Structures are given as structure tokens and as C-alpha cells.
Image: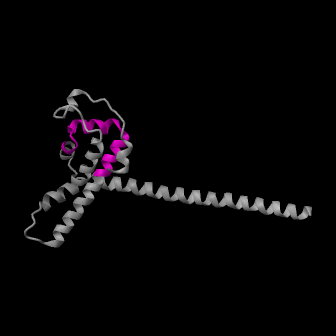
Amino acid sequence: MTQDAKRCRGRRTKVRTEYREGEKEKLNRHWRGLFLDKLAETSNVTASAKAAGVSPSRAYKIRRVEPEFNAQWRAALVEGYEHLELEVLGYLRAADPARKMDVAGALKLLALHAQTVARERALREDDDEQAVLDSIDAFIEDMRQRRAANAAILSEDVTSDGAD
């Protein structure tokens, strides 16, 4: 289970009966993590919901009402499309006649979601850039504090030397 999926644990969103169609009476309390893992693997919401033991309607409902789950969903889809890109590339490079793949279908799916994936990657890179800038700011602030502490120690030494 991903680290982000673990953070969603324990949250309960009320779901109306119509969103529970086809589900077992008692859900696996880890269904979100199972769903997200399968979504990253397949990029298929229906298959992911089935693997998690929930209805796709529930998954969509939770995505609408829980911003963190929505972000995790998008990240899982980006990961899934990255997997698909690598699979298609590997298939095309291997040229193994025994292996079957719907390349046209895969390329069509990637093209349909290219804008979404590009937006998510840009958001992720922007977050990474901000994290780097925050780290640099923290490092500079730490250096300033150490410099001030060293200056204070040196001024104490000078003062104590003059008292002798």
C-alpha cells in the first residue's frame, strides 16, 4: 500500500445505498489502498473497484468528496499510464510475434489522457520544485542561526578575556 493510501485510513464518508450496488455487506477497511494499487497497475476504474470489493459508484463518490483520495486517484492514474507507455515501448522494441497487444488501442488510450497526465506531471514537478526551494530556504536559515550562535560565543569569549 502506498504511503498516501495509508493516510486515508480511518476516514468514513457516508455513501447512499445506490452507491453500494454489487458490494459485499462488510467492506475491507483497506479498500482504498487496494483500489489505488490496482488503479496504478491497470488504469481501469471498474477492475480496480472489483479488486477492492467496492462498486465503481462508491469509488467515484469518495473521489468527489475526499480531496486527498482524489489526489491519490490522479497519482495512481499517472503511474498507470507510465506503466502502459513502458509496456507499449517494450512491445514495440521486442517485436515478439508470440506476444499479442492492441497497440492501436493502447496508443488511443494514451492520447485521450495525454493532457491529464501532462497536467498531473506538471503539478508533481511544481511540488518537487517548491520542495527544493523550501529545503534551500531552511538550509540558509539554519546557517544564519549557526552564524548568530557562533558570533554570540565569540563575543562572550572576548568579553571574558577582557575581564581577566
- Residue 119 lies, with reference to residue 16, above or below; the image says below
Residue that appears at 92% across and 64% down: 164
**Which sits in the foreground, 118 or 147?**
147
For residue 95: magenta? no
How was the colour assigned to the protein in this rendering? Answer: one colour
Would you say the magenta stretch is mainly helix, strand or loop? Answer: helix
Residue that appears at 11% across and 60% down: 102
Where residue 27 appears, x then y in whole percent?
24, 36
- Residue 54 lies, with reference to residue 85, above or below; the image says above
Where residue 154 appears, x then y in whole percent?
79, 63
For residue 60: magenta? yes
Residue that appears at 33% across and 32% down: 13
Q: What range of the chain is rendered magenta?
A: 50-76
Outermost residue toward the left in this view: 98
**Which sits in the foreground, 159 or 94?**
159
**Which sits in the foreground, 122 or 87?**
87
Q: Quadrant of residue 118?
A: bottom left
